[in-house]
Amino acid sequence: MTTNSSSAAGPKHRVVEAGIAVLIALFGVIVIIGSVKAGINWGAEGPRAGFFPFYIGIFIVVSSAINFWHGLRDGDDGLFAEWGQLRQVMSVVIPTAIYVGSMPFTGLYLASLIFIGYFMRWLGKYRWVTVLGVAFGMPIITYFIFERYFMVPLPKGPIEDWLGI
Amino acid sequence: MEEIVNLFHGFAVALQPFNIMVMLLGIVLGVIIGVLPGLGGANGVAILLPLTFSMPPTSAIIMLSCIYWGALFGGAITSILFNIPGEPWSVATTFDGYPMAQQGKAGEALTAAFTSSFVGALFAVIMITLVAPLVASFALQFGPAEKFAVYFLAFCSFVGLSKEPPFKTIAAMMMGFALAAVGLDSITGQLRLTFGFTHLLNGFDFLIAVIGLFGIGEILLTMEEGLAFKGGKAKIDLKVVLQTWKNLPKYWLTMLRSCFIGCWMGITPAGATPASFMSYGIAKRVSKNGNNFGKGEIEGVIAPETAAHAAGTAALLPMLSLGVPGSPTAAVLLGGLLIWGLQPGPMLFVEQKEFVWGLIASMYLGNLFGLIVVLTCVPIFAAILRVPFSIIAPLILVLCAIGAYSVHSSTFDVMMMLVFGVVGYLLKKCNYPLAPLVLAIVLGDKAEEAFRQSLLGSQGSLGIFFSNPLVSTIMVLGLIALFWSAIQEGITRLRGTRTAAA
């Protein structure tokens, strides 16, 4: 749970909660629009494709409206999280986003190597020996377990082509 | 009688050397998953599911279900030694387990936890052995309306029984249904909700959602809390085990009650977590040592562990016999069945006897092996937790990415996984339950199909859902479950006014 100390700063729980409710409602609206496009009435073969999701969309919008109202009325006054905590979270999300985004180009192994290395060196402050050991060890073990033993192909990039595996 | 013969056939299947090996591998992996923060039963099984694509389905499900048992066992280790519940269902175990460890009774607490887990699981497996075939043969007569009614009941019990606000449960659940609807409509073959994105043609795979919501989301939560693990050393020697076992029969009533609570909560898709809390709460109220609860009372370890394990096991009963999973992990296993080309539900008991009974037999053996493995290897598993989070976290993230990729060999899925992860973090922080969301993604298409087929039969009249006693009963049960909290409140209010008047 978040701390309620007044000295810490961060977004209010109530605000985030309301924001989430609005986003979910928007998602519901998109579902409704998409369903209407697909057709929500009865066709020759019974209810058409949009029939079921249309009502699902309405449920989403209505329940989000209620959640929004509840959140504003009696949501807790505490913080959602402190800025420092959110920074911690972002320090995982952003590298992971880069990792995931570069995977189609570099392949999984190289991307994982750099990702693990970055994480351990900059967030964990480990010695280079440990960092390199884990960063190289993990992809190599992964290769043998997944590709060799269980025969699950994983994405590869130019390096793997060059190495011929 | 036929069941016993089938069960023995099942044991013959489960005891093949390859299956035993797979079972042990599953248990060990499961305990590790249960011990590590950010990896739980559901996403652990989801990540490792692709590994089983090349195996025969029976071995595959044995391995995956053993991962599940292992995770159930593993959760107790971290709760007792480190006061960190590795799994949500072991939160209640920390209340008394950790104080016991601080008093130097870690060995006793662990032995009690593992043994009562085993008892709970055994009870639930016996129940599955006896009840599942009956339920399945009964469910064979179900038409589309009855099928929809069962789904309706399952989802309504989520709304009524979960501790989150009902409208948040509904919102989460409906998002799951909407995500399931994206892509090709199975009845008309029409595309819907794709908005022209070709990546969305096949819709959202629930495995990606599970890995993202539970795996990545959990890591983000752990990052925010900035966990540092500090804990006592774990050592169990045979003397402690035997001594604890000598004392355990005293608590048979607590165990039996927790077994029943666990089985009941496991079958209704409320799951292991509320079962463990409920069992702890009732044990505290009923026990003559109730005042000691929270200070290191062994009964406070036994009650939640028995119930959690019984519930986790019982969750497979509706999954096998009706095709409705009782927990997110059971949902992932159900997804596995679909990938291996097996249709979960009552027909499984007719067409895939070897598979079903092999699985049930493996539940007996897997839990027995699990008990032996955890009792003997606790120090090793506890040592894993001493590895700092800044090493564990990137490794888990890479594993999640591998798991997400290998489902469809698509890097787009890996990106979706991260999106689901951030969404999962936000939803969890705002107290939206994730289990109904996942279950709705898994069951969405089937529920919709049953709904539309029923309406087709009745020319659009909703009366079809109340057209015969069977379907009406299930629907009414569903409605009761839906409004359960309101009904409960009404009853207490009625009582309140009556006592006030008197």
Image (spheres, coloured by chain):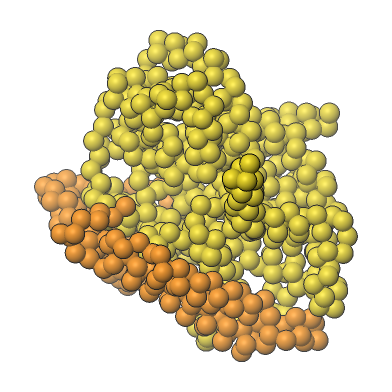
| Percent x, y of residue B195 | 52, 86
Instruction: Report the front residue among B101 and B403.
Output: B101
Residue at the bottom extreme? Answer: A37
| Percent x, y of residue B426 | 38, 64
| Percent x, y of residue B329 | 54, 49
Residue at the front extreme? Answer: B502
Q: Quadrant of residue B174?
A: bottom right
From this view, report whether residue B460 is shown above or below residue B210.
below
Q: Quadrant of residue B33?
A: top left
A153 on left or right of B227: right
Callout count: 0
| Residue appearing at x 52%, y 83% in the figure | A30
Is residue B411 among what the camera can see?
A: no
| Residue appearing at x 49%, y 26% in the figure | B302
| Residue appearing at x 85%, y 78% in the figure | B459
A112 on left or right of B184: left
Is residue B455 among what the camera can see?
A: yes
Instruction: Report the front residue among A13 and B365.
Output: A13
The chain shown in yellow is which? B
| Residue appearing at x 52%, y 87% in the figure | B196
| Percent x, y of residue B380 | 33, 29
From this view, report whether residue B318 is shown above or below residue B358.
below
Chain A is shown in which shade? orange
> Which quarter shows the C terminus of chain B?
top right
> Which quarter shows the N terminus of chain B?
top right
From this view, report whether residue B81 is shown above or below residue B331.
above
Instruction: Report the front residue among B99 and A90.
Output: B99
